[in-house]
Amino acid sequence: MRAGFAAAALATLVLAAPAAAQPNATQVLRGAVEAINRSHGPQVQDYAFTVVHGATRTPVYVERGDEEWMVHASEASPMGSLMSMAVVWPTFADVEDEPEEITEEMESARYLRSERVEGRTAHVVSSEPGEDPMARADSAVMYIDAENSRLLRMYVVGEMPAEGGQFAGGDMRLTVDMLDHRETDGVVVPRRVRVRVRMGMAGMSAGDRAQTRVGLAAVQTQLQGSTDPEEQGLLAVVEMFAKMLEGGEMDLPMTIEDVVVNAGPPAWLDEGM
């Protein structure tokens, strides 16, 4: 009888231990927001940097707005819009000195597991995204550094809007890795970023798909061998689009360089407005 009781008690402890040790998802998310706020303190009004992918260099400018941080990418870069997809961390920061109250999205968060991300232990938390920054997303999973609460990875699954052209109605899977964080004049910025995108082209007919293949191949032939940085950037976009056309994944490994804090709006910002 005693042995049976002891075995039952031990089994209860073993089964209960993971739940007892499991972090609180809301607290984990709140810690991530506070970590980003600390790297965007009241002394920081803006910062600029260059996103580099291969031979393509895209200037990016981040400024403190009235209600949120705003991200601008140079329209002169052939990959400007794609590069700006990688700069997601400012959208999680509050412009006020004190973090805002816990949102409904945080309260509904679920703790999934612990996982390694490039050698770092990360808390993996799922939450239903709000309208910003991931509109139309069905789910969002955050990978948050267990040691310093920095956001290491964001994974979003959703459906493309009806006005999305050839992507309309198709599934979207977006992963953004934010790694190798370093501080510059009060701003902590990841120096290695990777964006992976997979989109279903539900809105494209078989005929349109075949015609697009021919057009993309012609552009690739025209641009191959070019040493012009802008044409090399355009070629990279065309090649990634062609890969997605065949059901593949767009993969953008990038580095962030030349971080400058509180230098004011860059000249290209006015030119692109």
Image (tube, grey):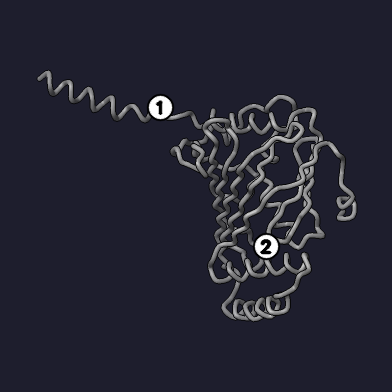
Crowdedness near tag 1: few (<14), some (14–19) or many (≥20) residues, C-alpha within 10 Å: few
Instruction: Give the residue drawn at x 89%, y 55%.
Output: 271
Q: Give the left or right position of residue 132, taking residue 262 as reference.
A: left
Q: Position of residue 84 (x, y in %)?
A: 71, 52
Whether 223 is drawn above or below 195: the answer is below
Is residue 125 visible in the rendered image? The answer is no
Q: Position of residue 201 (x, y in %)?
A: 58, 67
Quarter occupied by the N terminus? top left
Residue at numbered disc 1: 21
The amino acid sitting under disc 1 is: Ala
Whether 15 is drawn above or below 48: the answer is above
The amino acid sitting under disc 2 is: Glu
Q: Position of residue 20 (x, y in %)?
A: 38, 25
Is residue 134 visible in the rendered image? The answer is yes
Instruction: Give the residue drawn at x 90%, y 50%.
Output: 267
Instruction: Give the residue drawn at x 60%, y 49%.
Output: 176
Q: Nearer the viewer, residue 135 or 255?
A: 255
Whether 17 is drawn above or below 51: the answer is above
